[in-house]
Image: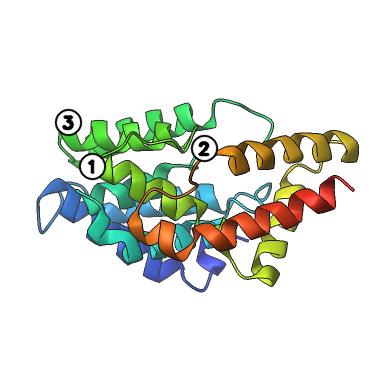
Amino acid sequence: MTHDDHPAAEDLRERFARTLRAASGHADAPADPYPYADNLLARWSEPHRKYHTVTHLAAVLDHIDVLEEHAARPELVRLAAWFHDAVYRPDRSENEERSAALAERALTEAGVGPEGVAEVARLVRLTVTHDPADGDANGEALCDADLAILAAPTPAYAAYTKAVRAEYAFVPDEAFREGRAGVLRQLLDLPRLFRTSYGRSQWESAARENLTAELDLLTP
């Protein structure tokens, strides 16, 4: 599927254009925003992606809309969402670093100022750990939006886990179960999954129930 085939592609292009203009401080950004949007949507539409897709991107952006008041610079958080998995290969460990470097190049060229570019790149790199420092409002908003899938209703959570498994189809079943169970235990051991007050009140309990249920299935 190309990004043009996605029913929300045109809406996403417009959302990116508005965000880039807001981040650059110009009603008309110095650069045409649409080629950048199209490049990013093409990346998010790569055929090897099963979970980290345009649908995931749109969901994270929607969650940032919900969390907007918790962010100090919501337009930069939205740009970080666009770039946070722009480079994605499930068999590589440097995806976030390469995505951050892409953001630095593209946003500088597109007319975002140095401080804005640096903040977007920092936020992208933060998604390695999803562990923002206390008081990092932008980081808290981005990480909560990215992890909100963990609190999805049971059918949607099941679809998420199926898509994650499909992305890692090259990993044998036993190795995947062990690796995934380890990730789930690490998440459940965190004192809190979500950092914003909204995330803690609306998503924390459901996410822990989903993670616990999945771990039970993986470790009979």
Which of 178/97 is in front? 178
Instruction: Tell me if residue 197 can be seen.
Output: yes
Residue 186 pos. (x, y %):
62, 36
The secondary structure type at the circle numbered 3 is helix
CB under 8 Å between callouts 1 and 2?
A: no
Mark closer to the chain start, 3 or 2? 2
Mark closer to the chain start, 1 or 2? 2
Distance from the alpha carbon under mark 3 to that under mark 2: 22 Å
| Residue that badge 2 annotates | 87
Q: Residue 114 carries which label?
A: 3
Q: Residue furthest bottom?
A: 7
The secondary structure type at the circle numbered 2 is loop
Is 149 above or below relative to 31? below
CB under 8 Å between callouts 3 and 2?
A: no
- The residue at the point 44 percent across, 42 percent down is 84
Residue 146 pos. (x, y %):
47, 51
- The residue at the point 44 percent across, 50 percent down is 194
Amino acid type of the residue that numbered disc 2 sits on in the rendered structure: Val
Residue 36 pos. (x, y %):
35, 48
Amino acid type of the residue that numbered disc 1 sits on in the rendered structure: Ala
Is 92 above or below relative to 141? above
Distance from the alpha carbon under mark 1 to that under mark 3: 11 Å
Quarter of the image for residue 121 reads top left
Relative side of 62 to 22, left or right: right
Q: Mark 1 or 2, which is nearer the eye?
A: 2
| Residue that badge 1 annotates | 110
Color scheme of the displayed model: rainbow
